[in-house]
Amino acid sequence: MSTKPRIRLPDNARIGEVIEIKTLIAHPMESGNRRGNDGSLIPRLLLHTFTAKFADREVFRATLHTGTAANPFISFFIKVPGPGEFEFTWIEDGGAQVVERQALKVT
Amino acid sequence: MRQRSRITFILLAYSVAAGTAYAQQIKAVDEVRIDAAMRAAFPKASASADWPPRLKGDQSMQACSQHKDAPPSELARVIAARESASIQYPADGKLSGDWRRGEQVAQSGYGLRFTDYPPTRENGGNCYACHQLTKQEVSYGTVGPSLLEYGKIRKFSEADTKAAYEKIYNSHATFPCSLMPRFGANGVLAIEQITDLVALLMSAESPVNQP
Amino acid sequence: MKIIRKNVCAIALAFASSLAGAAQAQQKSDAIEHELETYRSMLKSDPWSNPGMLDVDRGETLWKTPGGSNHVSLEGCDLGLGPGKVDGAFAALPRYFGDADRVMDVEARILWCMEKLQGFERAELLTHPHPGPGMPVKDLGAIATYIAYRSNGRSFAAAFNHRKEKEMLALGEALFFRRSGPMDFACSTCHGDSGKRIRLQPLPLFSKPDEARKIVGAWPAYRVSTAHVMTMQHRIYDCFWQMRLPEVELGSDVSVALISYLVKQAEGGEISIPGMKR
């Protein structure tokens, strides 16, 4: 998980506006069902949870399973309650986390 | 208006001439230069004796390459005669083998790629890459014609069985500069495998010939 | 006469039914291809979610970060428009470079700059230069993806004016039709006709500019089946693998010649990177 995840927020937003947030992270999302060239099973390694907090309140949560493809793209919508900062967390099998923060410009 | 149409004509004539000159120019490439470029581009070819010959086609393939697979009729005759002479037949004379094994050969693309060494199984013919064969297999290519009901159409005749064998062994014997690999002559498939493919095409029980 | 007519009828019937079966499979393949095209055009209008963008980002970081034994960034690298000038450089490649005295595509040029400017070992860069399935594209490929991305929206416009550029084009065309190896394959064996496919994979006819323009500008592309970006050099390496030839060296004259031919055929075609492939 070395490349920084991509996050897209609108350049600015108004209070009460519904906006779309897009995220993209590099990850093999190994399901544990694939076999290598030698025939042995490649162990499962997934990002199992994605959460988004805005102004310290959780606004979105997703649980990912073996059906999610590598390099997952997750997007969701919120209604802007006021100014604040997003905090996105991806949690991997085994507990490793990637956390990214980005402020939302509210006019 | 007349001035504009004259300029247009001049521009058109120039572009046609330039295009023709360009087309003529790109034809002239020194074979020695190509050979040298190929040797330099594949440094790992020297690793074993198997590889350097792959960098250049044989006499027939050189002729086909030069004519973009559309040889003039006299040259086509020469190629057909040369390739026809390469055909070897099964020792027992049985041209049609086991269609079940034939289907496996047709499905498999294994063999001769640089990741297929040391080989862990026999080479495949990869027939489905280019052809439709059975009705059941929908994942088929269209580079070659459909072979669905191949034997049925030909009434399972002995003559067509022989023709099918020869076609797979060396397609250039009957179609000079055919796109189809010379499976027998190039040692891609064993004679037994070719007879299994013949059975796949020509035997009445084969799924290729089921409605 | 009756026998001939019966045979003709039988053949016609068989042909019609095989056509029906073929038409069905073609319809299915067309329907799939149509949906893929819809998906691709949606991606093109908003390419943000293409996972290849992560490699564009990585490439940009690599371009700007000091590296190699000389510990310098690639921002001094001349891609043909002057040192460090990135916008539009990919659209003008391949081209002749005086300092190297040869024609180079984007990957050959980045290889040159990584070696000469940054002090990377050329032999190391040429060993396993392409990723295996599931592995991300290597650094050189990521940089190439970034550079190509910075020509998005432009058309292929390599000039092919210089004598050596013209020679490369001629070599590329000759190589395209050159049959060899145990399968007697040339590039033209698969890419020599319109509307054909290998299994269910459609094959573009590269000698036809109309088709070349639609395809060449999508490379480097994100390959869904291997979950990584594949560059044009890697794509050609893969072709030679399938043709039962050995491993073609990254940036070799053969690879640059073929890329020159493809780019010339795609002249005027739009660059839209990263593409999205099966």
Image (cartoon, rainbow, N blue to C red):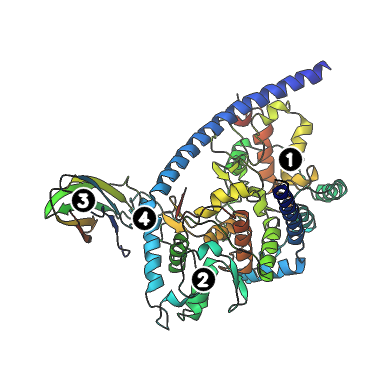
* Outermost left residue: A56
Q: Is residue C60 left or right of residue B20?
A: left
Mark 3 lies on a secondary structure that is loop
Q: Is residue C38 left or right of residue B147?
A: left
x%, y% of residue B204? 66, 27
Q: Nearer the viewer, mark 3 or mark 2?
A: 3
Closest to the observer, C27 or B91: C27
Closest to the observer, A29 or B210: A29
- Does B161 appear above or below C80? above
x%, y% of residue A45? 30, 55
- Spatial CA distance of label 3 from label 1 is 72 Å
Q: Which residue is mark 4?
A: A42
Q: Which residue is mark 1?
A: B165
Q: Is residue B97 left or right of residue B82?
A: left
Q: Same chain for the residues at labels 2 and 4, yes or no? A: no
Q: Same chain for the residues at labels 3 and 2, yes or no? A: no
Chain under label 1?
B
| Mark 1 in CB contact with mark 2 (< 8 angstroms) | no
Chain under label 3?
A
- Residue B136 visible: no
Q: Which residue is mark 2?
A: C79
Residue under the point 76% across and 65% down? B31
The answer to which of marks 4 and 3 sits earlier in the sequence is 3
